[in-house]
Image: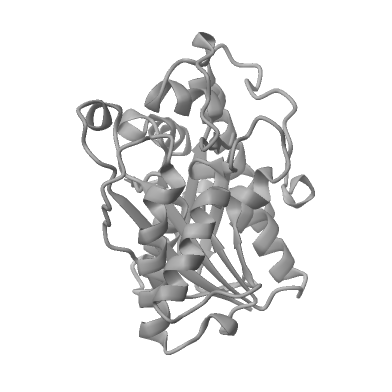
Amino acid sequence: MARWFDEVVPDDMFGERTAEKAERRFMGDAVKIVLKQAAVQPQQVDYFIAGDLLNQIVTASFVAEDLGIPFIGVYGACSTSVQGLALASALVDAGLANLALAATSSHYQTAERQFRYPIELNIQRKSTSQYTATGAGAVLVGQSGGKVKITEATLGRVIDMGVKDPNQMGPAMAPAAADTIFNHLADTGRDPGFYDVIITGDLGSVGSEILLELMQRRGVPLGGNYADGGVLLFGGVRGTGVGGSGCACSALITEGFVWKRMCNGEIGRALIVATGALLSPLTWQQGESVPCIANAVALQL
């Protein structure tokens, strides 16, 4: 996927003292890149909508401080990229904003420390674990000027099937993805073949298989146009388990691989379904199950 990214940074610490500061650099640079590409100054943007995986979404908050744009902080776990994109689109479509900027990020080290263990402890990873993507993505939404249109958004319901293992996020999120995809297709009167690609955020290889089975049971089987962002991002990379995860996972695939191929005319219609596990370190250690969500946006040329 690297060839579809605007910038690849060889140092995941970005020269910073802490991983949290490094993640802040990733999001800040993603925002700078998109503003430069659009020839837009921060003061021209009406809203900055952003979120991340850290407590109190501190990455987004610090970046918002630097930008000086009116800030709306959002949290949808790994579905945050599409949640922000849907909100930005709604504000622009309603005439409440001329330009809205949506961004998200994640970092392997900060997410591990937040949700599992500090990586210095060298905890044995399970075979079903996913690997948090280190990166960030940003999108500028306006009434005109872009090649790709956001035509619909389907915000998901919180689905909890009782999964309690934080190392099984794909199986936990798959029912939420199935629910949102089914509802989107039902609402729009479309079948899966309407889209050139349908891409989930970060179910991984295990969760993807479960999604395919759930959609088959609902009588709406997904075909060869379906793929998972986590599998696309880290497929075949040793040490990354069943695929990528994290807020950046869906953002990198959507705003790199999908968006650029759409701009090139290789993809005409795309359904992006970002998935998120809404757990906290406290709730799962108290034995709570993992509530999940999936948010979708339809993109068309």
> The C terminus lies in which quarter of the figure?
bottom right
For image coordinates 36% across by 84% down, the residue present is 187
- Image x and y of residue 67, in percent: 47, 38
For image coordinates 26% across by 57% down, the residue present is 158
Extreme residue in the bottom direction: 189
- Image x and y of residue 80, in percent: 41, 50
Left or right of residue 138, residue 62 in this image: left
Task: Tell me how many marks there are.
Answer: 0
Left or right of residue 257, residue 275 in this image: left
- Image x and y of residue 34, in percent: 62, 51
For the question of whether residue 41 can be seen, the reply is no
Front residue (pair 114, 237): 237
For image coordinates 35% across by 68% down, the residue present is 179
For image coordinates 46% across by 28% down, the residue present is 111
Left or right of residue 214, residue 128 in this image: right
283 is higher (above) or lower (below) than 37: above
Front residue (pair 73, 233): 233
For the question of whether residue 290 can be seen, the reply is yes
- Image x and y of residue 210, in percent: 47, 59
146 is higher (above) or lower (below) than 292: below
143 is higher (above) or lower (below) than 114: below
Front residue (pair 139, 168): 168
Quadrant of residue 257 within the rendered picture? bottom right
Quadrant of residue 182 within the rendered picture? bottom left
